[in-house]
Image (cartoon, helix red, strand yellow):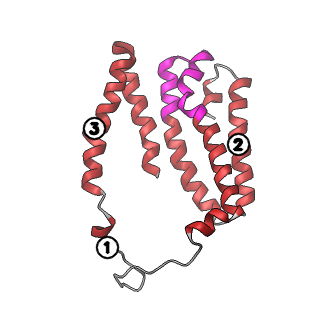
Amino acid sequence: LCGSGLTPFAVAAIANMTLPAHGWRITYLAIGALWAVIIVPLTLLVVRPASQAGTRHATGEGAAEESAGLSVAQGFRCPAFWKVFFAYVTMNFGSLALLLNLSPVLVSTGIPMSTANWIYGFSGFATIAGRIVGGWLVDRMPARVLGAATAAGMSALPVLLLLLPGSVPGAFA
């Protein structure tokens, strides 16, 4: 999942190169070309179907072991599943609403478009760091505490944009 953090940086670079001279239409075509020329062929070369990939276990055996746990029907009836599901969905709606509109939001506060695009690009590296640090923290602290801290941080950052309009350091935070 860390690879998805590189996309905002690549998109910001393409936008900064093409947007001033050619506008949004060409910029969107350039972003699409990035996917068509680089990402799609790379995916076809690297990703293999599960039937070809084989499985390896610590014992070195090739046979897949059945995993213990709930069936799909049991999982859907479990209240914990729905709590996690709704927490995940609501957090993603909030974070994606801001992230997908970050450049226009920053421009509306007075930050130049090229700077706003680079701040958006930086968000990709912040995503990578957040996933690595979050993965490390989830092994070392209670999930409730980590979830509450994440939700508080995600709520505080948009408020910071409101309190510091046009501030590049505030936008980077």
Q: Which residue is mark 2?
A: 153
Q: Which residue is mark 1?
A: 54
Q: Quadrant of residue 24?
A: top left
Element carrying mark 3 = helix
Distance of label 1 from label 3 (alpha carbons): 28 Å
Q: Position of residue 85 (x, y in %)?
A: 64, 53
Q: Which residues are magenta?
A: 97-121
Element carrying mark 1 = loop
Q: Which residue is mark 3?
A: 36
Cβ atoms under marks 1 and 2 closer than 8 Å: no
Distance of label 1 from label 2 (alpha carbons): 41 Å
Identify which amino acid the numbered label 3 is placed on: Ala
Q: Is 116 a magenta residue?
A: yes
The residue mark sitting in front, 1 or 2, is 1
Q: Where is 168 relative to 123, above or below?
A: above
Q: Where is 158 relative to 6, above or below?
A: above
Quarter containing the C terminus = top right
Q: Quadrant of residue 139?
A: bottom right
The residue mark sitting in front, 3 or 2, is 3
* Foreground pick, 5 / 39: 39
